[in-house]
Amino acid sequence: MTDTTPAASVTREAPDTQALVDLVTSRLRDIPDFPEPGVVFKDVTPLLADGEAFSAVVRDMAERRRGTVDLVAGIEARGFIFGAAVAHELGIGFVPVRKAGKLPGRTRGVSYDLEYGSATIEIHEDSFVGGERVLVVDDVLATGGTAAATCELLEGSNATVVAFEALIELAFLHGRDRLPGRDVHTTIVVGGD
């Protein structure tokens, strides 16, 4: 996603994850002035292209949640990549959370506010029968709006959101504040206090 600080620091979430943090950090690429001037985009594609790094991230997310979830929900678009891989690693199903109008058939959606307008996300109406324990996965936790809306959508569909996982947290945007009382884990934190 985006990093608007001039020189963001990268810190680790937990002391025992330093090797993973170093690996992930070495595989991220900053793209200055994308998608607009003054913004530094955190590009995860070099990490995805590195089998060792991608596997390490997927294993880390999966092992933390093994035995505690029944399904993984991935947020469009890079959350699909990480989420589907984590679901595969756990041997469980995957539910895509898509932008409005992208899923065929009957859907259920929720709208939420963005800095510059609003958006709607959807899931298939029959994604849950009720009571499934779900892990929500995305690549970046930025402002937290999409993550919070996803949790609201899933819980409104009778699922139980167990946790939220993301590769990168842009701490200066305070997205974690939009997920109060939730189990939130990110591999690296950029721009923390």
Image: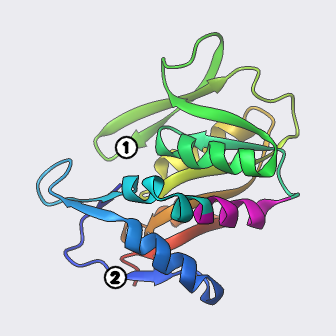
The quadrant of the rendering that contains the N terminus is bottom left
Which residue is the site of mark 1? 114
**Is residue 10 shown left or right of residue 186?**
left
Nearer mark to the viewer, of 2 and 1: 2
Name the secondary structure under disc 1.
strand
Earlier in the chain: of badge 2 and badge 1, it is 2
Q: Residue at x 49, y 19 (%)?
A: 102
Q: Nearer the viewer, residue 112 or 24?
A: 24
**Is residue 167 shown left or right of residue 32?**
right
The quadrant of the rendering that contains the C terminus is bottom left
**Is residue 32 within the magenta segment?**
no
Q: Position of residue 149 (x, y in %)?
A: 56, 42
Label 1 neighbour load within 10 Å: few <14, some 14-19, many 20+ = few
The magenta segment? 56-66
Q: How many marks?
A: 2
| Residue 142 visible in this rendered orientation of the protein | yes
The kind of residue on which mark 1 rests is Leu
Which residue is the site of mark 2? 9
**Is residue 130 shown left or right of residue 84?**
right
